[in-house]
Amino acid sequence: MKTEIIAHRGSKSNRPENTLAAFEEAKRVGSDGIELDVHLSKDQKVVVIHDDKLNRTTNGKGQIKNFTLEELKQLDAGSWFSPKYKGEEIPTLIEVLQLLADYKGILNIEFKTDRNIYPGIEARVFQLVQNYRRDLPVVYSSFNHESLIRLKKINPEADTALLLWERLADPWRYTEQVGATAQHLWEASAFSETTEQLHAHNIKVRAWTVNKPKNMHLAFNMGIDALITDYPEVALDLRRSFEN
Ligand code: G3P
Ligand code: MG
């Protein structure tokens, strides 16, 4: 079994995270999957950005939920990373889905509902995926497992993955109970017998954020299903050399 390489927030190491430039690059290098994070704007539009606040990755300040999409679109989400990316915007989920319309890999959409619950975000995201990515692979994840349960109520077929830092006792029980097909585990937790226990129950393990080549090798050796990394190109190269 081949460990899949999922680009974390796009190709985060060499492009401004969660921008169209980052997703374009992740696709260009041949990533098996692309991970992104979603929030809701004040006017209930699904936007792609990691933090609850604008401060770190844009030239704006304050909570995303307090700004309309039109206001968010005025901001520069590229210059903080490099002047080369001045003018990159906070993308909407629609824009990303359009950019990746012919991308056959996994799109991993993470609901950032751990601090703000963003009522209705699951239904909105699901509707957009129905409209733009109906027959292509999508995995939904969240640290807020209630978001995943809500999504399963909307669409029992949705493929969900529990985001976790820590290992659980009898990890398969809870995973099966909430209808998830995978755990997305902090790498130190994934490099343990938890992976074997989950595999014994046909539950996938995807480890994050695997950036060190040593840990990428470990993931390949352990048969971890996927690694989520800021360095998709490096991981893909390493996997090629690991296979030969
Ligand atoms: O989905 C893996 C990883 O993205 C979870 O953490 O904080 O980067 O969204 P974070
Ligand atoms: Mg994430």
Image (cartoon, grey):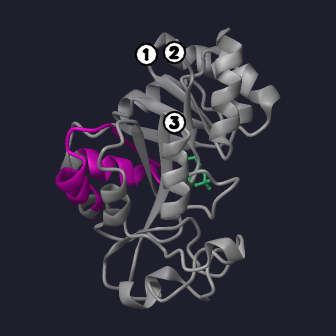
Residue holding disc 2:
199
Q: Position of residue 83 (x, y in %)?
A: 70, 77
Q: Which residue is mark 1?
A: 202
Label 2 with label 1: CB-CB less than 8 Å: yes
What is the magenta range? 125-152
Q: Label 3, on which residue?
A: 30
Q: Image check: 99 left or right of 65? A: left
Percent position (x, y) of residue 85?
62, 72
Nearest to viewer (mark 3 / mark 2): 3
**212 or 79: nearer the viewer:** 79
Local packing at callout 3 (Cα closer than 10 Å; few below 14, some 14-19, many 20+) is some
* Residue appearing at x 45%, y 14% in the figure: 201
Is 83 left, or right, of 48 in this rendering?
right
* Mark 3 touches mark 1? (CB < 8 Å): no
Q: Which element is circle 1 on?
A: loop
Secondary structure beneath disc 2?
helix
